[in-house]
Amino acid sequence: MTMSVPERKSGSEGKEEESEDESEILEESPCGRWQKRKEQVSQGNVPGVESASLAMDTEEGVEVVWNEVLFSDKKVFKAQEEKIKEMFENLMQVEHPNIVKFHKYWLDMKESQARVIFITEYMSSGSLKQFLKKTKKNHKTMNVKAWKRWCTQILSALNYLHSCDPPIIHGNLTCDTIFIQHNGLIKIGSVWHRLFVNVFPDANVQGKGRQHRDEQRNLHFFAPEYGTGEDDYAIDIFSFGICALEMAVLEIQANGDAAVSKEAIVNAGQSLEDPLMREFTQSCLRPDAKLRPTAHDLLFHRVLFEVHSLKLLAAHCLINNQYLLPENCVEERTKSFDPNAVMAEIKHEDRLGVQLKYSHVSPLELDKFLEDVKNGIYPLMNFASSRPHPVPRALSLSQEQVETVKTPTPEPQETESRKVIQIHCNLESNEEGTKTHVSHVVHQLSLFLKMDDKLHRQLSCDILPTDTSKDLASELVHYAFINEEDIEKVAGFLEDAMKRHRVGALPSGSTQ
């Protein structure tokens, strides 16, 4: 997802326990999974978002953000309803380890007004801007390795967005919309800022004065061509360049409340001692947008190659397939190695070669590196194709499983122990098809399952004429959505529903 959600505005800040007043449940989602609380969170400059409250995900047991957009004029809402739905359905498809997650949305119609409510990931550790301020206050300098890792993660997210079809332009990348977790993982929020500007021009927007001040304070993040109608992904590269520069120098000085001047930016760039860092940031800040590199190009810049590509590829291969390996295999293998044994050797005809011994690698450092790779701190995007993998068709994805499929690489799945006691499904023809199957007639399947513990599971996916009910049921078992013992029951129900749909009967059914 994609929204910026940094700091709490709680009046009890600094206390160990929340007051009962703040933890009071004000509202619940229709499915009962998300519970809105009274405590507000700072949402940043997101157009149209009238309020953002802390909420609890009762299934995962984690805090999330409950965002609301209000429409005082229901006619305006009705005129934009389809556009709103399309935008939020697209939001549901954005899935990247360095982008704040978007979990779910729903519409709430009342007599006096209409609301759009959407749930986003809560970034409790705060924004990059806050971290840089604390670092400067403590009279510390930025660690170069951390700077490289952060740049790589931000560029990985931008490369993903810019490689989508059509490309997604962030349009609001600042140190306030980038968040850092305690383990060093970077995530960018407010990804759909541009769409919110276009979709919610008539929404009841509060806090315009604060938004104006934020815009003034962050003017230096925006490219010269921003807002001209001719801007493209290059505006994100310019914004990233300013972010990279601020990360390196901790703060670009401004005169009071005024915007940061061009001279201050130039001086900050010249203060960088590393010539590669200087060249890297300056290439992003070129006035001519056509001369700026792409996010993909920047991922290959020499200054970012902290980890050898072969080591990174091997680590990702190990993480993605670790379910095939015995538990603690890395630890056990490193114990059995002779420290003086040579694991690799580089030979030169005209000079002495280089030997790499097992003693050169610390097992503790290796464990830490693998853990960082697993957490997304060393992404593999700079070695991927120029287009991101499509979101896996299998169960793409409803409220409950939006976090299940992280990559197209097969991962171990838990089994579902609960039994299905009630099924509803709906089949609708999709005349436009999908981008991956344009030439086929595609149907949209919505499946509602009631489990024996009274909890509900709602899934949806596109199905092709070649898909059979048994294939779909087997896929549900594989991804741990249903118990293996329910496969025949679910397959039979799906087969009946598909037959009724083919002969033009009602596309929905239910069973108990």
Image: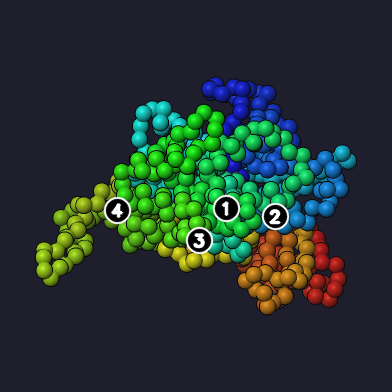
Q: CA distance from mark 4 to mark 3?
A: 52 Å
Marks 4/2 in contact by CB < 8 Å: the verdict is no
Marks 4/3 in contact by CB < 8 Å: the verdict is no
Check disc 4: other Cα within 10 Å, few if <14, some if 14-19, many if 20+. Answer: few
Mark whose residue sits in front, 1 or 4: 1
Task: Name the amino acid, label 4.
Answer: Glu
Q: Return the residue at label 1.
A: 225
Check disc 3: other Cα within 10 Å, few if <14, some if 14-19, many if 20+. Answer: few
In the picture as drawn, the residue positioned furthest to the front comes out as 263
Mark whose residue sits in front, 3 or 2: 3
- 512 lies above or below 499: above
Residue at (84% x, 76% y) in the render: 503
Mark closest to the chain's N terminus, 1 or 4: 1
Label of residue 332 in the image = 4
Label of residue 312 in the image = none
Q: Return the residue at label 2.
A: 87
